[in-house]
Amino acid sequence: MKRLFRLLAMISLTAAAVACAPRERTLVLLSTNDMHAKIQRFPHLAAAVAACRDTVTTLLLDAGDRWTGNAYVDLAQTPGMPVIALMNRLGYDAATLGNHEFDHGQAFLGRMLDSMAFEVVCANVESDTCTFPQLPPSVVIERDGIRIGIVGAVTNYEGPGHPAGNASCFEGLSFPDPQAKASECAAALRPDVDVLVLLSHMGDDRDAELLARETRFDVILGGHTHEEVDTLVNGTLLTQTGKDLQCVGVTTIRLRGRKIAGIDYRLVPLGGYAPDPEYQAEVDRCYADERLNRPVGSFASAADKAGLANWMASAAAAEAGAEVGFYHIGGVRLDSIPAGGIGTARIYDLEPFGTQIAVMRMTPRQMERMIVAKYNEPTREGHRLDLVSTTPYEILVNEADSAVGVRFPQLRGGRSYRVSVSDYVYKNYQGLEYADGSISGVKVADVLLRQLGEESPLKPDNRMRQRIVRSPAAAH
């Protein structure tokens, strides 16, 4: 009988323990970044989001760069509004700023923020202007009893001191160190939330720097570098979905009570989902723009990234009557254009910034200093071939991958040449030396459209005229 009582007591205690054990809950964070207005994938995203929301508690988040890259969005009656309208309809919960949110100026962005039905957070933008409201650094969202803290941060590394872009877009704003500000928010929020998320538009390299010393975040949903990232850094999940809405990030967080029991991440291609018909109809209306669809000219053969950069450099130089043309690779926004007819929209996708041609006089020594300074920048734009040119050149680098000189086989030392660059290079590259410099007011996209109309079919030149020569003996 005593044994029976003991058995019944054990069963009772076990049942009580099970009853008191915390319930396991699941939270899914769906994330996008660097959409760059590629709304043609939005109907697939809508289908993926609906499938997830039907089964589990879900938050939908974005890590910046929502526009610039699709003429049907960027040249809409209100630039950028088609993508914001779709995000509002889909029910995004929160987002941070990317550098391209500032492309139309801060006054424009200030007005657009009023149209966003989701929270926009950024810990490291400070405003003292009436045109741009001060954003909250973070937000706490509660779902199914789970408190999720969301912090935002944007790059300030390429400016320097502000996000990548024309300095005039950032006047009156300051951008403190995003890593320091993210850590400040983490310290303040961590005691009050169950899950702590950083929406970062710093780039995965800078995110990894932060995580080397900051362990309070549970996950970073990143952007800016257009990489597909799924890794652990110092025990914290670091993710990024690539670009152009090719994929959606799926971060699954399991909690027992208020403790995280496990986190995993999957990158899900959106092409596997049948498009939602209602969202597809909305996208189709955006694309039914005759002025953008009308063919302008054609390519006789396909152009790759080098061919497009060569075309932009040479077209700008020809328009300006320049002997040497340079074009920065970051301003070439398509990786290729196939052979065949080309409409206006494709050219504005290639050059969506309204870039103008700048002209100046430079010696080969001054060109060398420009190229070396850019190559040696401690930013993600450094240590690569950044300036495509109509004239061949070689960058000489040492064992430490520092540029120490440039060879121009077709230029004469000491002579002054008429040189064309983009106004982005003219305004933003550090330490430029030149004479008689000015911005022409002529837009690169207009020059490309005119060439297409007058000289088609164009034959792209896909040869890269520039190269990096890595030699331990490299010396100036």
Image: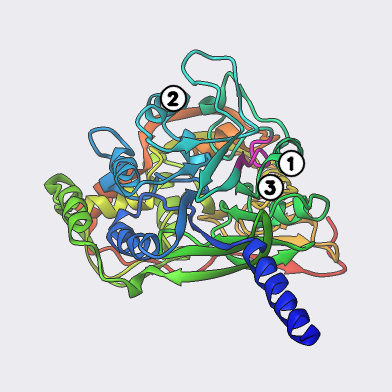
Number of the label disc, if any, that sits on residue 212:
none
Q: Is residue 37 visible?
A: yes
3 vs 1, front mark: 1
The answer to whether marks 3 and 1 mark residues whose Cβ atoms lie closer than 8 Å is: no
Instruction: Report the front residue among 370 and 98.
Output: 98
* 95 over 52 or under it: above or below: above
Number of the label disc, if any, that sits on residue 110:
2
C-alpha distance separating marks 2 and 3: 32 Å
* 226 over 416 or under it: above or below: below
Element carrying mark 3: helix
Q: Residues within 10 Å of mark 2 (few under 14, many from 20)?
A: some
Q: Position of residue 169 (x, y in %)?
A: 51, 27
Element carrying mark 1: helix
The residue under label 3 is: 374
The residue under label 1 is: 191
The answer to whether marks 2 and 3 mark residues whose Cβ atoms lie closer than 8 Å is: no
Q: Position of residue 387 (x, y in %)?
A: 58, 52
2 vs 3, front mark: 2
Q: Which residues are magenta?
A: 150-160
Residue 154 colored magenta?
yes
Residue 151 colored magenta?
yes
